[in-house]
Image (tube, grey):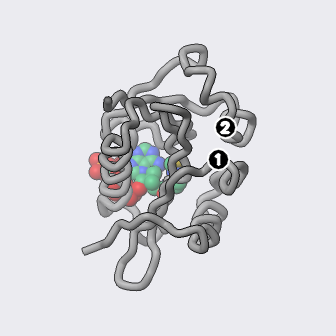
Amino acid sequence: MIQIALATGEQLTIMQHFLQASHLPLAGLERDLWRAWLAWKDETPIACAGLERYGKRALLRSVAVAPTWRQQGIGSQLVRTVVQEAQALGIQEIYLLTEGAEAFFKRLGFQPIARENVPAALHASAEWNGACPQTATVMVLRCG
Ligand SMILES: CC(C)(COP(=O)(O)OP(=O)(O)OC[C@H]1O[C@@H](n2cnc3c(N)ncnc32)[C@H](O)[C@@H]1OP(=O)(O)O)[C@@H](O)C(=O)NCCC(=O)NCCS
């Protein structure tokens, strides 16, 4: 049984640790992050995810599960929770950039989208501006 909870500002360092271990970008984390979540097993953080907000759209970023906890449904559970909470907060579309986890996100309802169809508001994100390579796949979930 795991617990998923909003991360506090002080817990951002936990997230940074996960991102470094998973080779995911740290750029813009403090500047752009709107909400972040941590998954806990007892007192141990085992996964993280974050959202940047651009009006009624959001960018899902920094989804990482500690290596020993992968392939057990935790990533899926975490993303579903983030999507539900984002929806409840009025978010209508959730975008993400990924290199290599397309199949994982597709199973959760995200669909690939051409870069030119991504709304300009999201171009402000550090992830968009080079933190994630141009070759990263862009995906969207329409949830509004
Ligand atoms: C991608 C990631 C978050 C998935 O977390 P997880 O807890 O292992 O995922 P789940 O256990 O909920 O789901 C596993 C399922 O997704 C698939 N999957 C998991 N990781 C995958 C990946 N990197 N690429 C493609 N499919 C993947 C598995 O095949 C599995 O499918 P199955 O149930 O049919 O066997 C985790 O592997 C991770 O932290 N990776 C490194 C960081 C990363 O790439 N993050 C995403 C970019 S933002």
Q: Are marks 1 and 2 in contact (CB under 8 Å)?
A: yes
Name the residue: 34% across, 49% down: 85
**Amino acid type at image mark 2:** Ser
Name the residue: 30% across, 47% down: 84
Q: Quadrant of residue 30?
A: bottom right
Q: Position of residue 53 (x, y in %)?
A: 53, 40
Q: Quadrant of the N terminus?
A: bottom left
**Amino acid type at image mark 1:** Asp
**SS under mark 2:** loop
Q: Is residue 141 above or below residue 39?
A: above
Q: Nearer the viewer, residue 100 or 133?
A: 133
Q: Quadrant of the C terminus?
A: top left
Mark 1–mark 2 Cα distance, whole angstroms, equals 7 Å
Name the residue: 70% across, 35% down: 133
Kindly tell me whether mark 2's CB lies below 8 Å from ligand 1: no
Give the crowd class for mark 1: few <14, some 14-19, many >=20 residues within 10 Å: some
Residue on which disc 1 sits: 32
Q: Nearer the viewer, residue 121 or 25?
A: 121
Count of numbered badges drawn on the protein: 2
Residue 24 as seen in the image, left or right of residue 37:
right
Residue on which disc 2 sits: 125
Q: Is residue 100 above or below residue 137?
A: below
Q: Residue furthest top?
A: 116
Name the residue: 60% across, 14% down: 116
Mark 1 or mark 2: which comes first in sequence? 1
